[in-house]
Amino acid sequence: MLPVDCPHPDAAETRRVCVHLLEALAPDGDVEFYQRFTGTGREFELRCAACHAGGGGADVPLRRLCERCCARVQEAGGVFGVLGVEGRPGVRERSPSRVRFVHERVALPTPVPDLATTLQPIGGSPACAFVALTRAGGFVRLDADRGVVEPLCHLSPDARVDLDKPVDLHVSPEGDLAAVANSHGQFGAVVHLTTGRLTMRLARDTYHIAHSRFPLAFFRRGDRTLLVHATAWNRLDISDADNGRRLTAREFVVRPPLRLPDHYLDYFHAGLAVSPDRRWIADNGWVWHPVGVVTSWSLADWIGGNVWESEDGPSKHALCHRSYFWDGPLCWVGDRTLAVWGYGTDDDWLLPAVRLFDVASGEETGWFPGPEKGEMLAAADAGTLLSFSGEQGTSVWDVATGDRLLHALDFRPHAYHPGAKRFVTLFPDGVLQRSTLSAMP
Ligand SMILES: [Zn+2]
Ligand SMILES: [Zn+2]
C-alpha cells in the first residue's frame, strides 16, 4: 500500500499535485498547470502557475494522488490546460538484454535504382518482398529473400503524379496493385503492377491539401482488394481497387433551415492505417485551430452497412488531441491497440514516448517514454514494438512494461516487413542486409 492523499491506497503509481489545482477542480474552477517530469520513469508533478513561478522549492504544497485521481486533474485541464512541460520521463532499460538482431548480407546482382518512394512491403505474404517507385517512373520489386531487384511496369502519365514532388506509395496485400499519389497533391491512381494498367483514378479536392497527407489504405475482404481513399478533404470512400467501383456511395443532403448537411464532418483526413485483422481503421488527421486528432472507427461496420461510419458512426472515437501536430508515427500492436508517438497536447512540448489506445473503447490504456521524434514505429508482434530512424538506430520495446529491450544505435535499416518480420538495409555498394530479431540463447 502506498501513502496517498486520495481515497485509493491500492494505487500502483502515484503523482504529486499542488493543492491549488485540487481546489480548482470545483465546478467553476480553471485548471491550468505545468507538468514536471522527475526523470524517474513516468513520474511527474502538476503545479499551478503560482507554484511553478515560485521555483518549486520544498514549500510547494503538494499532495500525493493515485494515477486515476491525477488523471481527473489532467482531464479537467484538457488540451489547453497544460501551460508547459519540464524535464523528461526516464526510459527504463532492460538489462541484460535478452534479444539481439541477426544480420545476413547478400550482394545484389543489379543495384537498386534511385527511388522516389520508400520501400513498401507486400504485407500479405511472409515472403520478404517490397515494391518501390523509381525517380524515372518505373516500379521495381525487391525480393530480399532471393536478393534480386526486378523491374515491373512504368507509371502512366495519366496517373497525374508529379515525380518531382513527394510521392506516397501503397502496395496491396497481394502485391498486384499499387496506389500512388503526391503526398500533398490532388491526384493519383491505382496501378496494376504487372500490366501497368490504371485500374482506378484518385482525386480529392484542393482544400488545405498541402497540410493533409493523401489518405490511402489497402485491405483485403474475402477475395477482393479494397482501397480506402480520400474523395474530399473531409470524405473517405472505399472502392474495389481492381475496377474502381465505389462501395460507400452516399449523398450529403442539406435540410433547411440547417446550413450543414446531416453527417457533416469538420475533419481533415490524412494518413490511414488498417488493423491487422482488418476490423478497424485509424486516421491521422486534424481539425481547426489546428489540432491533430487521431481518430478510429470500425472498418467492418463501415463496409458492413453503415456508409456514414467514417463520419459519425457509433464506433468512431477521437483518441488524442495535439495542437499543431498530426500525421506523426503510429502503428497497430495487435488487432485492437493503436500505438501513437508523442506524449503531450502541443507540438511545442511533445515528449518522446508512445501512447496506447484501445480502439474498441476509445480509452488510453497506457504509455511509456521512449522513441524519439522522427523514429518510425512497427510492431514485431502484439507485445513488442520496434522504433527506428537514421539518427536513433533501432530500439525494441516491451509494450506491456515500456522497458527498452535493446538499443542498436548503429543499426539504421530502411524498411521493415511485417509478414517476414525482417528489416532490410540497402548499402551504397549494392549490398542488401536482412535482419531478424532473435531471442538470446
Ligand atoms: Zn499551486
Ligand atoms: Zn485516487
Image (tube, rainbow, N blue to C red):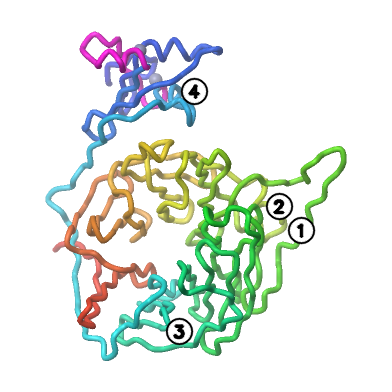
For residue 279, what is the image quadrant?
bottom right
Query: Label 3 amino acid?
Result: Gly
Q: Which residue is mark 2?
A: 308
- Ligand 2 within 8 angstroms of badge 2 C-beta: no
Query: Label 4 amino acid?
Result: Ala
Q: Which residue is mark 4?
A: 76
Q: Nearer the viewer, mark 4 or mark 3?
A: 3
Secondary structure beneath dot 2 equals loop
Q: Which residue is mark 3?
A: 138
How far from the left and from the top, in percent, is residue 356?
41, 45
Q: Nearer the viewer, mark 1 or mark 3?
A: 3
405 or 416, which is in the foreground? Answer: 416
Residue 130 appearing in the image: yes
How far from the left and from the top, in percent, is residue 131?
42, 78
Secondary structure beneath dot 1 equals loop
Indicate which disc, 1 or 3, sits on the residue closer to the N terminus: 3
Real-space Cα separation, disc 1 to disc 4, in angstroms = 38 Å
Real-space Cα separation, disc 1 to disc 3, in angstroms = 36 Å
